[in-house]
Amino acid sequence: MDRTLLIQELEKKLGQEKVISDKVDLMYYSYDSSFHARLNRFMPDVVVTPRSTEEVSEVMKLAYTHNIPVTPRGAGTGETCGSVAIQGGIVMDLSPWDTIEEVDVANMQVFVRPGVIHAKLNQRLAENGMFFPPDPGSSLMCTIGGMVANNASGLRAVKYGCTEQYILGLEVVLPNGEIIITGGMQSRAVKSVSGLNLTKLFVGSEGILGVITQIRLRVWPKPKGRGIVMAVYPSLDDAPASVLEVYKAGILPSGIEILDQSAIQAVNMYRAEINLPNAEAILLFEVDGNPASVEWEGLKIKEIASQRATQVEWATDPKRMADLWEGRSVVATAAARVRPDGSRVFAGEDISVPLSKVAETLREIRALGKKHHIKVVNYGHIGDGNVHTAPVIDPEQPQEVEAAQRLVDDIHRLAVRLGGTTTGEHGVGAVRAMYAELEHGAAVKIMRSIKQTLDPKGIMNPGKVFGPEEE
């Protein structure tokens, strides 16, 4: 369909105020946080901002009839080009649709629209003594719809798991405009084994199967106590060994974070007053629950960590906890400081490996950095083996860009070779689609057949998850 005619048809269905077509305004939607988007611009033909399920359905019917690609988008904080229009067409911006429809306190669940911001949802839930546990680092920006589409997790996945564990049901508009509800049409149950689990099929599907328009979330009571243990290690291998010993003691912290030597250096260069100890690794164990159990678990972790660490501190005072946590909270920003003329790029940033392979992974990434002459900062969620890698380069130098791309390829292949995955929480998008066959083998054929069944015309977020060649 001609672009001018497409815009006119969308304006008839939604109103001019919900259709964005100015070329300058469209630039905003041509990128996300990824390095791939920094190197390219993926311009949509038009952007729509629907505010009802019916409006989404009308857009999808039009797109389906005329074979127009549709890319659902939340806040655009992703790092994999998942929400950019690789093949043009319509970007459906769901971020303005930020209504919390209902907080069902009695049944421990909440109904939200896809544009609700994670932090705002938890602020609302806190009024009723509840919270939504998954905690991505972009809490102040990311949307619940984006979290569902990417099965996001974050800092506290060790204890609380990923987003999928809290999704009780979804309202989804399929590529042909049909509207379905998963998890039961009228259900408010928190447990069901009725029928095929379509809810889990759409969670983590990255917008390639349909548009999520409403989410029924399970929520939990908000813990009354919290504490943090910081442990400083002279040997990298001692850090994961301590984590394993904590698990063997029957303790499941809410989060376990690691900063290796490169991250410690970056933080101290960025903010000298934090003054992290010079070491091979620093671990932060966070525990939460009722105050009595928090105190017992914290002291026990301190005892275990002290067997290997040279310095250990346990804190429950809010100010001191904030001080201990500050180094971890700034490391993503601090990474660029390891090179005065450099910039941190978001690429190869999200592998996950077995806990037993974390130390080996960090050492190999260091070696790969040296091989490609690129400074790399490493940190992450060691409790579930999720390693975040921050290459620092000069993006204006073509040879450095090429070296970074080779480094990133090596990091992804390293993860698979060590029994891990190319992405632990950020998703596949366009940038990791090339590794689908390597990681999943023949199972990719089944994934493609599901996609073909629900989206026979291939209009939903094409070029993602499996790559463009067979979309």
Image: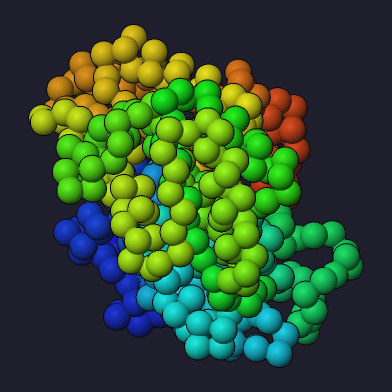
Image: 308 above or below 360 = below
Image: 443 above or below 33 = above
Q: Position of residue 401 (x, y in %)?
A: 25, 23
Q: In this rendered view, identify the residue nearer to me: 116 or 267.
A: 267
Q: Is residue 68 left or right of residue 300?
A: left
Q: Position of residue 33 (x, y in %)?
A: 32, 47
Q: Is residue 368 left or right of residue 331?
A: right
Color theme of the render: rainbow
Can you tell which quarter of the image residue 272 is in? top left
Q: Is residue 338 visible?
A: yes
Can you tell which quarter of the image residue 8 is in? bottom left
Residue at 53% across / 82% down in the picture? 125
Residue at 40% across / 67% down in the picture? 317
Q: Is residue 292 left or right of residue 98?
A: right
Screen quadrant of the N terminus: bottom left
Can you tell which quarter of the image residue 394 is in? top left
Residue at 37% across / 54% down in the picture? 325
Residue at 62% across / 69% down in the picture? 292
Q: In this rendered view, identify the residue nearer to me: 302 or 192.
A: 302
Q: Position of residue 174 (x, y in %)?
A: 63, 64
Q: Position of residue 193 (x, y in %)?
A: 88, 65
